Amino acid sequence: TQTKTKDFLGHPGGLSTLFLTEMWERMSYYGMRAMLVLFMTASMQEGGLAITVASATAIYGLYTGSVYLMGLPGGWMADRLIGGQKAVWYGGIIIMFGHIVLAIPNDYTFFIGLILVVLGTGLLKPNIGAMVGQLYSSDDHRRDSGYTLYYLGINLGSLIGYGVCGYLRINMGWHWAFGAAAVGMAIGLLMYRATLHKLEGAGAEPTVKLSPKAEKISWTVIGTFLVGLVVVTYMLMNGMMTFRPVIVAENFAIIATVLFLGYFAAIFFLGNNNPNEKRQLGALFLVCLASIFFWTGFEQAGSSLNLFGQNYTDRIIGTFEIPPEWLQSANSFFIILLSPFFAALWINLAKRMITPTYGFKCALGLIIMATGFLVMFFAAQVAATGLKVAPYWLIATYFLHTVGELCLSPVALSAVSKLSPKRFAGQMMGVFVLTYSIGNVVAGLLAGNFDPNKVEDMPNLYLQISLFTISIGIVIFLFTFKTKKWEKLAEQPSS
Ligand code: GLN
């Protein structure tokens, strides 16, 4: 699709629409997520829910896992029923209501609010990501760079979210901070509405229209699911059913993995793909595997690395104590700093006819991320002697994690948009978003091995994670010799 609207930093104008909408959606998502565990574990006097740490972290894992799990039906609905544009619009509205409900001070509203955010994000997240790719023709080399810019928007949003919600939480109280997330999403919706024309039809219609009968059945299934959800929520709230978050969370990883493999296999074997499409899907599968292992390591930022920051890092500068949360925002900060370089790097390499494959970049990203855990191995050895380590160790780790993230994450999004058959655009993004879901939950389970009272075990745990991930990275790298040719098939403008 050639664009007629004004360019956005050398990219199709529609990228600015998606950039700004996703920026505000992520502001609301990360702003709220940052205080979620704090809110659950805070005492009643402090205005919290007084839930135990074990349950709260399990609910947190379930929540982040579910947000991305719902991307699967969300992507399907866009492809077959309503198109990406409507999915993003209604998804955003549901998210906004979720945050409004959370802002009402009452512990019943808490779970209803979370469920709404999960449902809305499932509709919005995969489809906005898929629409970015639809702005480019299949031989347009700006695609990777476009996704890198889009990724910058994601992290600008998260930084605003951490700042605004964090500030409001401390100075005004929980519900103001939750309210701010609703306002953020509302701004995103307004921006989306006002600049929708720039998308020039990308995502306006479902890619494959269902027969009226199939459409009716689909809506009935969706309706039944929602009614079921309302009933279960009602029963949970009235104590008619008990909810053991830890056990549910443990099973979640298995279900998400089975769903990922099953859905991918279904599209591969039953999707009427021609041999070239099958090869491209094969190349994409490798990218998805890299993504799972990547997020499994990376998403420990909030757990095992956060604990290290809290307990074993010297955070005192003069009379000032750096809050452990601040160390976390290093990731968003480095993304914002480095994104323009990466966006330019891919374009410049392409100009010199150097186009590293998706598989290669993802293997590289995985290995670089794993070296971050090698840094932690050394840091933990110092900590094991009883000394507190300097903050640079964690910052260096986050730096390596971010460089790895920029090699892998935006690139993988671009790969999904390019290597999947158009009629599955939203669904494949939904399947891909499942890799986030698996990564987030498994990261939580792994972090459970870190016992803050057994510092002597820490170096080895970090070393194991690092070596294991490096090995996976090498295996993926070796497979790229095979998938390289498969990826190239997608270059043909006709596909
Ligand atoms: N930060 C990225 C996003 O919000 C990736 C999130 C993840 O957990 N994989 O889109």
Image (tube, rainbow, N blue to C red):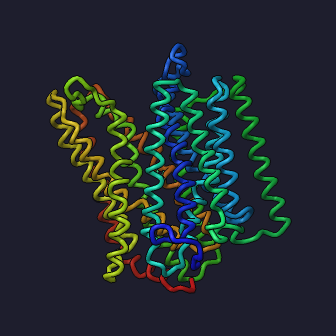
Q: How many marks?
A: 0
Image spot of residue 82 (x, y percent): 73, 62
**Residue at the image position 29 percent from the left and 34 percent from the top:** 309
- Residue at the outermost front position: 6
Give the quadrant of residue 340: bottom left
> In the shown orientation, is residue 386 left or right of residue 230?
left
Q: Give the quarter of the figure containing the N terminus.
A: bottom right
In the rendered image, is residue 261 in sight?
no
Residue at image point 66% right, 51% down:
91
Q: Quadrant of the C terminus?
A: bottom right
In this picture, residue 210 sits left or right of residue 201? right
Using the image as rendered, state which of residue 37 and residue 336 is in the foreground.
336
Residue visible at 15% across and 28% down in the picture = 387
Q: Would you say residue 304 is visible in this rendering?
A: yes
Residue 365, quarter of picture: bottom left
> In the figure, 489 relative to 18: above or below?
below
Image position, residue 15 (x, y; %): 53, 65
- Counting from the top left corner in percent of width and height, residue 39 is at 51, 26
Check the image and report above or below for 344 versus 216: below
Q: Is residue 60 above or below residue 275?
A: above
Write down the quadrant of residue 461 in the picture: top left
Vertically, is 265 above or below 101? below
Residue 184 coordinates in the image, percent (x, y): 57, 43
Name the residue: 51% across, 45% down: 27
In the displayed structure image, the side of residue 460 where residue 185 appears, left or right: right
Seen from this angle, which residue lies furthest top? 45
